[in-house]
Image: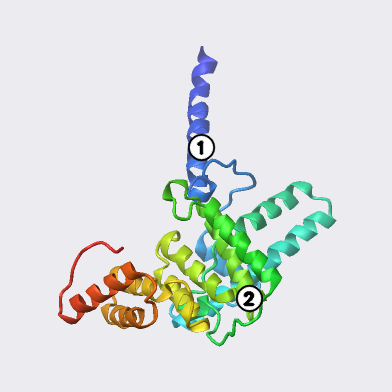
Amino acid sequence: MFRFINRLPFAFALVAGTVALSAACNVDPLYRGRRVEGPVTREPASKARADAARSGVDVVSVSGNEVDLVEAVATHRSLYHQHLEQLRDYYKSHGYAAKQGWADFELKGLKNVKAFRYLAEAEVPQSQLQPTESVSEADAMFQRAEELMKQGGHGVPIFYRQKLMIEAADVLRGLVERYPNSDKVDDAAYLLGEIHKEYLPGQELIAVKWYERAWTWNPQTPFPARFQAAVVYDYRLHDRDRALELYHAVAKDETGDRSNLRFAQRRINELTSGERTSQASP
């Protein structure tokens, strides 16, 4: 009995430590339900900065301007990935299987991280593209992205799966980057606008940029890109001046969908008369 009582504090400490570690690991909804493997280490930011300074790495002060800070993030993000791959290769060549597994696990996790460029214009390619060619590889990528969106619950929210939507977005961005002259780039831009608007919270600024690219690359796009951008500016970004400009463009250039046209006309009347309604977006 005496030995059992002496061991109680250790047992409680062990249980508490296990619970705390489990809670710390389960912070990303994309990883919920997965078994976390590999080491969990944390170092104070001050120690990380000191180590970086000793190694000659330039650490940008938070007092820099936005462009400098964004460029610094991009540079260090690239170096982080590069050095992690080198570390993995070192462990592999020296037969350290366990540590190689840790590095592989960390590299795999990076693929699930959306790396923002933070400057809205940098999130999308330049507007001077001419989608004039039929490219079979681009067509196949577009069909693949559509299938991923369908599997991810596009149009059926109850079946929504964020991971598949992110994968579809990656395929569409790859299409635009690899085949900039494909006649599918404007269609891909519209679907990217849909993904960023509907399925990735807080990314409306990126969504409207992709919608803009859709009609810039193809002024006769069959998709209601101007209308969708107008609604986002109107109800989510609360930029009524830009919304009004786009509603006028809908009335001029997107006359195929009568319900969209009626809604645009009504909002033009409301916004030009100074009314500010609180009705839900269509």
Q: Which mark is residue 177?
A: 2
The outermost residue toward the bottom is 128
Q: Position of residue 279 (x, y in %)?
A: 22, 63
Q: Which mark is residue 104?
A: none
Given the image, on which type of amino acid does mark 2 rest? Glu
Which is nearer the eye, 267 or 31? 267
Placement of 149 over or under 176, stated as above or below: above
Secondary structure, mark 2, is helix
| Quadrant hosting residue 125 | bottom right
Q: Position of residue 177 (x, y in %)?
A: 63, 76
Residue drawn 43% across and 79% down?
63
Q: Earlier in the sequence, mark 1 or mark 2?
A: 1
Q: Is residue 194 left or right of residue 188?
A: left
Placement of 209 over or under 159, stated as above or below: below
- Residue assigned mark 1: 17
Q: Position of residue 144 (x, y in %)?
A: 62, 60
Q: CA distance from mark 1 to mark 2?
A: 47 Å
